[in-house]
Image: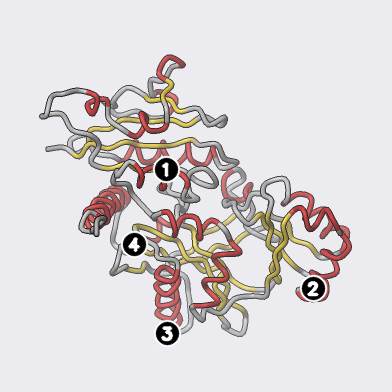
Amino acid sequence: MKTKLCLLFGGKSAEHEVSLQTAKAVIKALDLEKFDIDPVFISPEGEWRKGTPLKSPVEDVAELQFGSEQNVSAAEGLQSTSLQTIDSTDRGYDIIFPLLHGPNGEDGTVQGLMEVLNLPYVGNGVLASSAGMDKVIMKNLFKEAGLPQVSYVSFIRSTWETDHEAAYKKVEQEIGYPCFIKPANLGSSVGISKCTSREELEAGFTEAFLYDRKIIVEQGVKAREIEIGVLGNDFPEMSVPGEIVAKKDFYDYKAKYVDGDSVMIIPAELPDGMAETLQQMSKTAFQAVDCSGLVRADFFVTEENEIFINEINTMPGFTPYSMFPLLWENSGVPYAELIERLVALGIERHNEKQKIKYTV
Protein backbone atom coordinates (compact mmCIF):
# COMPACT_ATOMS: atom_id res chain seq x y z
CA MET A 1 0.00 0.00 0.00
CA LYS A 2 1.29 3.44 -0.92
CA THR A 3 1.98 6.06 1.74
CA LYS A 4 -0.68 8.77 1.57
CA LEU A 5 1.24 12.04 1.86
CA CYS A 6 0.12 15.66 2.16
CA LEU A 7 2.69 18.23 1.06
CA LEU A 8 2.15 21.56 2.81
CA PHE A 9 4.05 24.51 1.34
CA GLY A 10 4.09 28.27 0.74
CA GLY A 11 3.11 30.05 3.93
CA LYS A 12 2.47 33.50 5.33
CA SER A 13 6.13 34.31 5.85
CA ALA A 14 9.01 36.31 4.44
CA GLU A 15 10.42 32.89 3.50
CA HIS A 16 7.46 32.01 1.26
CA GLU A 17 9.58 31.84 -1.89
CA VAL A 18 12.13 29.60 -0.17
CA SER A 19 9.30 27.19 0.66
CA LEU A 20 8.27 27.07 -3.00
CA GLN A 21 11.81 26.09 -3.96
CA THR A 22 11.75 23.34 -1.34
CA ALA A 23 8.36 22.05 -2.54
CA LYS A 24 9.53 21.97 -6.15
CA ALA A 25 12.54 19.84 -5.20
CA VAL A 26 10.64 17.42 -2.98
CA ILE A 27 7.85 16.91 -5.52
CA LYS A 28 10.39 16.03 -8.22
CA ALA A 29 12.15 13.58 -5.90
CA LEU A 30 9.12 11.71 -4.53
CA ASP A 31 8.50 8.26 -6.00
CA LEU A 32 4.89 8.07 -7.21
CA GLU A 33 5.11 4.30 -7.00
CA LYS A 34 5.52 4.65 -3.24
CA PHE A 35 3.44 7.75 -2.44
CA ASP A 36 -0.03 9.13 -3.13
CA ILE A 37 0.53 12.89 -2.94
CA ASP A 38 -1.90 15.73 -2.23
CA PRO A 39 -0.50 19.27 -2.42
CA VAL A 40 -1.78 22.00 -0.08
CA PHE A 41 -0.62 25.55 -0.78
CA ILE A 42 -0.71 28.43 1.73
CA SER A 43 -0.69 31.85 0.06
CA PRO A 44 1.38 34.78 1.38
CA GLU A 45 -1.90 36.12 2.79
CA GLY A 46 -2.50 32.92 4.75
CA GLU A 47 -5.16 31.46 2.44
CA TRP A 48 -5.15 27.64 2.20
CA ARG A 49 -5.70 26.02 -1.21
CA LYS A 50 -6.03 22.28 -1.62
CA GLY A 51 -4.78 20.97 -4.95
CA THR A 52 -5.79 17.94 -6.93
CA PRO A 53 -3.82 14.74 -6.17
CA LEU A 54 -0.54 14.41 -8.02
CA LYS A 55 -0.91 11.70 -10.68
CA SER A 56 2.28 12.26 -12.66
CA PRO A 57 5.63 13.98 -12.14
CA VAL A 58 5.77 17.77 -12.48
CA GLU A 59 8.76 20.03 -12.97
CA ASP A 60 7.45 22.99 -10.98
CA VAL A 61 4.84 23.82 -8.36
CA ALA A 62 3.31 26.15 -10.96
CA GLU A 63 2.06 23.03 -12.77
CA LEU A 64 -0.04 21.94 -9.77
CA GLN A 65 -3.76 22.50 -10.08
CA PHE A 66 -5.10 25.10 -7.64
CA GLY A 67 -7.98 27.47 -7.91
CA SER A 68 -9.90 29.96 -5.77
CA GLU A 69 -12.80 27.51 -5.58
CA GLN A 70 -10.49 25.10 -3.76
CA ASN A 71 -9.91 27.37 -0.77
CA VAL A 72 -10.28 25.42 2.45
CA SER A 73 -9.89 25.88 6.17
CA ALA A 74 -6.59 24.84 7.71
CA ALA A 75 -8.12 21.73 9.25
CA GLU A 76 -9.73 20.72 5.94
CA GLY A 77 -6.41 21.24 4.18
CA LEU A 78 -4.66 18.81 6.50
CA GLN A 79 -7.33 16.15 6.25
CA SER A 80 -7.94 13.94 3.25
CA THR A 81 -11.36 14.36 1.67
CA SER A 82 -11.78 10.64 2.29
CA LEU A 83 -12.19 11.49 5.96
CA GLN A 84 -15.54 13.06 5.07
CA THR A 85 -16.89 9.77 3.67
CA ILE A 86 -18.45 6.85 5.49
CA ASP A 87 -16.52 4.23 3.53
CA SER A 88 -14.31 2.51 6.10
CA THR A 89 -11.88 1.47 3.39
CA ASP A 90 -10.95 5.12 2.85
CA ARG A 91 -8.30 6.59 5.11
CA GLY A 92 -6.77 9.91 5.94
CA TYR A 93 -3.19 10.94 5.40
CA ASP A 94 -0.45 8.68 6.68
CA ILE A 95 1.79 11.72 7.10
CA ILE A 96 1.87 15.51 6.59
CA PHE A 97 5.13 16.96 5.26
CA PRO A 98 5.25 20.68 6.19
CA LEU A 99 7.71 22.23 3.74
CA LEU A 100 7.38 25.58 5.48
CA HIS A 101 10.16 27.96 6.47
CA GLY A 102 9.94 30.80 8.95
CA PRO A 103 7.00 32.12 10.99
CA ASN A 104 3.53 30.58 10.57
CA GLY A 105 5.00 27.24 9.58
CA GLU A 106 8.38 26.44 11.10
CA ASP A 107 7.67 28.07 14.46
CA GLY A 108 5.33 25.53 16.06
CA THR A 109 2.05 27.12 14.90
CA VAL A 110 1.24 24.59 12.17
CA GLN A 111 2.76 21.83 14.27
CA GLY A 112 0.30 22.71 17.04
CA LEU A 113 -2.59 22.47 14.60
CA MET A 114 -1.46 19.02 13.51
CA GLU A 115 -1.11 17.92 17.14
CA VAL A 116 -4.65 19.07 17.92
CA LEU A 117 -5.91 17.12 14.89
CA ASN A 118 -3.75 14.14 15.97
CA LEU A 119 -2.11 13.94 12.55
CA PRO A 120 1.37 12.50 11.97
CA TYR A 121 3.85 14.93 10.44
CA VAL A 122 7.48 15.17 9.42
CA GLY A 123 9.93 17.10 11.53
CA ASN A 124 10.10 18.84 14.85
CA GLY A 125 7.26 19.18 17.32
CA VAL A 126 5.68 22.29 18.83
CA LEU A 127 8.27 22.99 21.52
CA ALA A 128 11.35 22.35 19.38
CA SER A 129 9.92 24.30 16.45
CA SER A 130 9.02 27.36 18.52
CA ALA A 131 12.21 27.34 20.58
CA GLY A 132 14.32 26.73 17.50
CA MET A 133 12.69 29.64 15.70
CA ASP A 134 13.18 32.11 18.56
CA LYS A 135 16.94 32.75 18.61
CA VAL A 136 16.82 34.22 22.12
CA ILE A 137 15.01 31.25 23.68
CA MET A 138 17.21 28.86 21.70
CA LYS A 139 20.41 30.48 22.94
CA ASN A 140 19.12 30.45 26.50
CA LEU A 141 18.58 26.69 26.19
CA PHE A 142 22.07 26.26 24.73
CA LYS A 143 23.48 28.17 27.70
CA GLU A 144 21.65 25.82 30.09
CA ALA A 145 23.12 22.85 28.19
CA GLY A 146 26.65 24.25 28.57
CA LEU A 147 27.26 24.92 24.88
CA PRO A 148 29.74 27.74 24.17
CA GLN A 149 28.32 30.80 22.36
CA VAL A 150 29.31 34.33 21.42
CA SER A 151 27.98 37.14 23.64
CA TYR A 152 24.45 38.34 22.84
CA VAL A 153 21.74 40.73 24.02
CA SER A 154 18.11 41.03 22.95
CA PHE A 155 15.48 43.76 22.70
CA ILE A 156 11.76 44.06 22.07
CA ARG A 157 10.43 46.79 19.80
CA SER A 158 8.57 48.72 22.52
CA THR A 159 11.71 48.99 24.68
CA TRP A 160 13.72 50.28 21.75
CA GLU A 161 11.04 52.76 20.75
CA THR A 162 10.90 54.07 24.32
CA ASP A 163 14.65 54.75 24.50
CA HIS A 164 16.73 54.29 21.36
CA GLU A 165 19.89 55.63 22.97
CA ALA A 166 19.79 53.18 25.89
CA ALA A 167 19.52 50.25 23.48
CA TYR A 168 22.44 51.41 21.37
CA LYS A 169 24.62 52.04 24.44
CA LYS A 170 23.82 48.58 25.82
CA VAL A 171 25.06 47.01 22.59
CA GLU A 172 28.21 49.14 22.50
CA GLN A 173 29.04 48.44 26.15
CA GLU A 174 28.22 44.72 26.28
CA ILE A 175 28.83 43.54 22.71
CA GLY A 176 30.86 46.16 20.83
CA TYR A 177 31.70 46.23 17.12
CA PRO A 178 31.49 44.38 14.86
CA CYS A 179 28.13 42.89 15.75
CA PHE A 180 25.24 41.25 13.95
CA ILE A 181 21.59 42.23 14.37
CA LYS A 182 18.93 39.63 13.57
CA PRO A 183 15.16 39.30 13.91
CA ALA A 184 14.66 36.74 16.68
CA ASN A 185 12.05 34.74 14.76
CA LEU A 186 13.16 34.48 11.16
CA GLY A 187 15.55 32.41 9.09
CA SER A 188 17.24 32.44 5.67
CA SER A 189 19.30 35.49 6.77
CA VAL A 190 16.33 37.81 6.23
CA GLY A 191 16.64 41.15 8.04
CA ILE A 192 20.22 40.57 9.22
CA SER A 193 22.76 43.41 9.33
CA LYS A 194 26.46 43.51 10.11
CA CYS A 195 27.29 46.67 12.06
CA THR A 196 30.69 48.29 12.54
CA SER A 197 29.53 51.77 13.63
CA ARG A 198 26.71 53.59 15.44
CA GLU A 199 25.22 54.63 12.09
CA GLU A 200 25.07 51.02 10.90
CA LEU A 201 23.75 49.93 14.30
CA GLU A 202 20.80 52.34 14.10
CA ALA A 203 19.99 51.21 10.55
CA GLY A 204 20.29 47.56 11.60
CA PHE A 205 17.83 47.97 14.46
CA THR A 206 15.33 49.61 12.12
CA GLU A 207 15.73 46.87 9.51
CA ALA A 208 15.43 43.95 11.94
CA PHE A 209 12.33 45.37 13.65
CA LEU A 210 10.56 45.35 10.29
CA TYR A 211 10.44 41.56 10.52
CA ASP A 212 9.86 40.86 14.22
CA ARG A 213 8.95 42.50 17.53
CA LYS A 214 12.06 40.94 19.11
CA ILE A 215 15.66 41.13 17.88
CA ILE A 216 18.98 39.71 18.97
CA VAL A 217 22.40 41.37 18.71
CA GLU A 218 25.41 39.07 18.67
CA GLN A 219 29.13 39.65 18.96
CA GLY A 220 30.90 39.40 15.61
CA VAL A 221 33.76 36.95 15.40
CA LYS A 222 36.21 36.17 12.64
CA ALA A 223 35.45 32.54 12.06
CA ARG A 224 34.65 29.76 9.64
CA GLU A 225 31.00 28.68 9.36
CA ILE A 226 30.70 24.92 9.85
CA GLU A 227 27.41 23.02 9.71
CA ILE A 228 26.28 19.55 10.76
CA GLY A 229 23.09 17.70 9.76
CA VAL A 230 21.21 15.79 12.45
CA LEU A 231 18.70 13.09 11.54
CA GLY A 232 16.59 10.97 13.89
CA ASN A 233 14.33 11.01 16.93
CA ASP A 234 15.51 9.69 20.29
CA PHE A 235 18.74 8.30 18.85
CA PRO A 236 19.91 10.88 16.28
CA GLU A 237 22.67 10.43 13.73
CA MET A 238 25.05 13.19 12.68
CA SER A 239 26.38 13.92 9.19
CA VAL A 240 29.87 14.83 8.10
CA PRO A 241 30.63 18.54 8.64
CA GLY A 242 30.32 21.06 5.83
CA GLU A 243 31.67 24.59 5.48
CA ILE A 244 30.02 27.70 4.03
CA VAL A 245 32.49 30.09 2.42
CA ALA A 246 30.70 33.35 1.65
CA LYS A 247 32.21 35.79 -0.82
CA LYS A 248 30.54 38.66 1.04
CA ASP A 249 30.90 39.78 4.67
CA PHE A 250 28.30 37.24 5.70
CA TYR A 251 25.98 34.62 4.26
CA ASP A 252 22.92 36.78 3.57
CA TYR A 253 19.65 36.02 1.79
CA LYS A 254 20.92 37.06 -1.67
CA ALA A 255 24.04 34.94 -1.30
CA LYS A 256 21.87 31.94 -0.39
CA TYR A 257 19.05 32.20 -2.90
CA VAL A 258 19.73 34.85 -5.55
CA ASP A 259 23.38 35.35 -6.41
CA GLY A 260 24.73 31.95 -5.42
CA ASP A 261 27.53 34.00 -3.90
CA SER A 262 28.91 31.30 -1.66
CA VAL A 263 30.75 28.00 -1.81
CA MET A 264 29.97 24.80 0.13
CA ILE A 265 32.87 22.54 1.06
CA ILE A 266 31.80 19.02 2.08
CA PRO A 267 33.36 17.47 4.02
CA ALA A 268 34.99 20.46 5.68
CA GLU A 269 38.71 20.29 6.33
CA LEU A 270 39.11 20.35 10.10
CA PRO A 271 41.81 19.53 12.66
CA ASP A 272 41.92 15.99 14.02
CA GLY A 273 39.07 15.30 16.39
CA MET A 274 37.10 18.47 15.66
CA ALA A 275 34.50 16.76 13.47
CA GLU A 276 33.65 14.41 16.32
CA THR A 277 33.43 17.36 18.75
CA LEU A 278 31.07 19.23 16.42
CA GLN A 279 28.93 16.12 15.98
CA GLN A 280 28.62 15.65 19.73
CA MET A 281 27.76 19.33 20.22
CA SER A 282 25.12 19.01 17.48
CA LYS A 283 23.59 16.07 19.32
CA THR A 284 23.61 18.02 22.58
CA ALA A 285 21.86 20.96 20.90
CA PHE A 286 19.32 18.64 19.25
CA GLN A 287 18.43 17.08 22.58
CA ALA A 288 18.53 20.35 24.55
CA VAL A 289 15.69 21.72 22.39
CA ASP A 290 13.90 18.31 22.30
CA CYS A 291 14.14 18.04 18.52
CA SER A 292 12.90 15.25 16.27
CA GLY A 293 13.28 14.41 12.61
CA LEU A 294 15.83 16.86 11.34
CA VAL A 295 18.03 19.77 12.35
CA ARG A 296 20.94 21.64 10.84
CA ALA A 297 23.34 22.80 13.53
CA ASP A 298 25.52 25.82 12.67
CA PHE A 299 28.85 26.64 14.31
CA PHE A 300 31.62 29.21 14.26
CA VAL A 301 35.24 27.97 14.35
CA THR A 302 37.81 30.70 15.00
CA GLU A 303 41.40 30.88 13.80
CA GLU A 304 42.39 29.59 17.25
CA ASN A 305 40.04 26.59 16.68
CA GLU A 306 37.64 27.80 19.35
CA ILE A 307 34.11 26.52 18.68
CA PHE A 308 30.88 28.46 19.25
CA ILE A 309 27.43 27.15 18.42
CA ASN A 310 25.53 29.72 16.40
CA GLU A 311 22.06 28.23 16.00
CA ILE A 312 20.00 25.26 14.93
CA ASN A 313 17.52 25.30 12.07
CA THR A 314 14.52 23.01 12.57
CA MET A 315 13.46 23.17 8.91
CA PRO A 316 16.65 23.92 6.98
CA GLY A 317 16.83 24.65 3.29
CA PHE A 318 15.79 21.42 1.61
CA THR A 319 16.50 21.55 -2.11
CA PRO A 320 19.06 19.02 -3.44
CA TYR A 321 21.57 21.91 -3.52
CA SER A 322 20.95 23.06 0.07
CA MET A 323 23.48 22.30 2.76
CA PHE A 324 21.38 19.85 4.81
CA PRO A 325 20.64 17.38 1.96
CA LEU A 326 24.19 17.75 0.64
CA LEU A 327 25.61 16.92 4.06
CA TRP A 328 23.60 13.72 4.10
CA GLU A 329 24.37 12.86 0.48
CA ASN A 330 28.05 13.05 1.44
CA SER A 331 27.25 10.86 4.45
CA GLY A 332 25.73 8.14 2.27
CA VAL A 333 22.05 9.16 2.25
CA PRO A 334 20.88 10.43 -1.19
CA TYR A 335 18.07 13.00 -1.47
CA ALA A 336 15.15 10.67 -2.24
CA GLU A 337 16.18 8.29 0.55
CA LEU A 338 16.52 11.23 2.94
CA ILE A 339 12.90 12.21 2.27
CA GLU A 340 11.72 8.64 2.85
CA ARG A 341 13.67 8.40 6.11
CA LEU A 342 12.12 11.64 7.34
CA VAL A 343 8.65 10.33 6.52
CA ALA A 344 9.40 7.13 8.46
CA LEU A 345 10.72 9.14 11.42
CA GLY A 346 7.56 11.26 11.45
CA ILE A 347 5.34 8.19 11.53
CA GLU A 348 7.54 6.64 14.23
CA ARG A 349 7.24 9.76 16.39
CA HIS A 350 3.47 9.89 15.94
CA ASN A 351 3.05 6.23 16.87
CA GLU A 352 5.13 6.76 19.99
CA LYS A 353 2.86 9.62 21.08
CA GLN A 354 -0.18 7.37 20.78
CA LYS A 355 1.16 5.39 23.76
CA ILE A 356 0.67 8.39 26.07
CA LYS A 357 -2.19 7.99 28.55
CA TYR A 358 -4.54 11.00 28.67
CA THR A 359 -6.96 9.76 31.32
CA VAL A 360 -6.43 9.27 35.04
Q: Secondary structure at mark 4?
A: strand
Farthest top residue in view: 69
Farthest front residue in view: 360
The scheme the figure's colours follow is secondary structure
Quarter occupied by residue 310: bottom right
* Amino acid identity at mark 1: Leu
Q: Secondary structure at mark 3?
A: loop
Percent x, y of residue 342: 30, 52
Percent x, y of residue 187: 57, 52
Point out the image quarter for the C terminus. bottom left
| For the residues bearing labels 3 and 4, Cβ distance under 8 angstroms | no
Q: Residue at label 3?
A: 273
Mark linked to residue 231: 4
Q: Residues within 10 Å of mark 4 (few under 14, many from 20)?
A: many
From the viewer's side, name the closer residue of 54 and 31.
54
| For the residues bearing labels 2 and 4, Cβ distance under 8 angstroms | no
Tag 4 or tag 3, which sits nearer the N-term?
4
Quarter occupied by residue 240: bottom left
Give the answer, above or below, for where 223 lies relative to 180.
below
Q: Distance between the Cα atoms at labels 2 and 4? A: 36 Å
Q: Distance between the Cα atoms at labels 1 and 4? A: 16 Å
Kindly identify the residue that appears in the image at 69 percent across and 58 percent down: 215
Point out the image quarter for the N terminus. top left
Q: Distance between the Cα atoms at labels 2 and 3? A: 32 Å
* Amino acid identity at mark 4: Leu
Tag 4 or tag 2, which sits nearer the N-term?
2
Q: Distance between the Cα atoms at labels 1 and 3? A: 35 Å
Mark linked to residue 176: 2
Q: Distance between the Cα atoms at labels 3 and 4? A: 21 Å
Q: Residue at label 1?
A: 99
